[in-house]
Image (cartoon, rainbow, N blue to C red):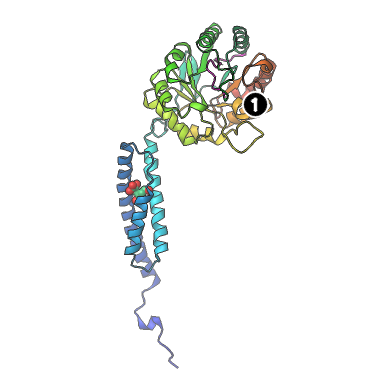
Amino acid sequence: MRGFPTLRSMTHQRSIEDLRAEVDQINRDLLTLLSKRGEVVAQIGHAKTQEGRPNHYDPAREDKQLKEIESLNPGPFTSAAVKAIFKEIFKASLDLEESNDKKQLLVSRKVKSEDTVLDIDGVRIGGDAPPIIVAGPCSIESEDQMEQTAAFLAAKGVKILRGGAYKPRTSPYGFQGMGVDGLILGSRVAKEHGMLFVTEVMDTRDVEIVAEHADILQVGARNMHNFALLREVGRSRRPVLLKRGLSATIEEWLYAAEYILSEGNSEVILCERGIRTYEKWTRNTLDLSAVAIAKQETHLPVIVDVTHAAGRRDLLIPLAKAALAVGADGIHVEVHPSPATALSDNEQQLDFAGYDKFSDSLSGLLRQPVGV
Ligand SMILES: O=C(O)C(=O)C[C@]1(C(=O)O)C=C[C@@H](O)C=C1
């Protein structure tokens, strides 16, 4: 019996090898076209950046292309399959545009590969410098309080004294800080003990006066999105300690730093201080990956404020150890002679005995730069 003719006997069948060779050539052609598309799209991305459009995603443009692709689809692939492939192409194109954009950020390691090491009157921060400690009370409250704290911390080798003169309080009726008197006091006491003085500036109108008294200007978490303030501290020519915003993404934090660098001030210290999450057992959630990412993606020093991250004293030692283990260039911790009577944050500041225990536990990690 001869039976029905098979497909093979009806057509001249090409061998699998032969067909695969043709597929290989089509792949090469597709790749050439894809690369060509990528280059054109990169130019679109560049033009968008120059127009000041940081968000390159354009769903309307994608939709228009998908509609045309659907109407022209000759088969054999279904429209759904072809659309899925093109959506992947749009996604890769968008990633390309955005990564090109990031490459040009002044904070990026792609622009400056070596670590930025700050040298503020001989105090080195970042790079191969040993991790630093920034310590002091939440608020500057009195001469006695500052004098006692500075004398204690200086004797322990702490080189940077912190203290808030302007306090961003949740309630407008809470203690708002000593203002200019606090600045004068903080800077005098720090100088007397051979320390640098860091304090927060909250208002563009105060940048000049704060820069006159402080060695480092702090931009607090609540002001990380205050772009006018970021620009102003960028023009101030004082090093800036930039805290990450309460709910800021890493990208937003790095863009905030970019604002400062773009004004010509490259002396920025990033400070991770925990972010808001659903977790209630800590005041914030310390984001250690943000520290590792900021170290990887930027050339700036990164420190960790363990006090605000935890909001509780019993976690300060393990969190500081973890921060140093992931590469932090320093630790920020609040210390007060009598936390119970402090005018702000009295739940979380360390007393002197607490600080002794804290620094003893970290001593091995503080002497040597981690990873060297
Ligand atoms: O046409 C643009 O605006 C592009 O940025 C290019 C492109 C694309 O790949 O076609 C990429 C991302 C946008 O979401 C839309 C379109």
The answer to whether 220 appears left or right of 261 in the picture is right
Query: Which secondary structure class fits the magenta region best?
Result: loop
Magenta range is 156-169
Quadrant including the N terminus: bottom left
In terms of image quadrants, where is residue 360? top right
* Residue depicted at x 38% and y 20%: 235
Q: Note whether residue 55 is visible.
A: yes
- Most extreme residue toward the bottom is 1
The answer to whether 342 appears left or right of 162 in the picture is right
Residue 200 vs 222, above or below: the answer is: above
Q: Nearer the viewer, residue 28 or 94?
A: 94
Q: Mark 1 is on which residue type?
A: Leu
Q: Position of residue 117 (x, y in %)?
A: 46, 22
Local SS, label 1: helix
Q: Position of residue 283 (x, y in %)?
A: 62, 30
* Residue depicted at x 31% and y 37%: 51
Within 10 Å of the Cα at label 1, are there few (<14), some (14-19), or many (20+) other Cα atoms?
Answer: many
* Magenta-span inclusion, residue 160: yes
* Magenta-span inclusion, residue 180: no
* Residue depicted at x 42% and y 28%: 227
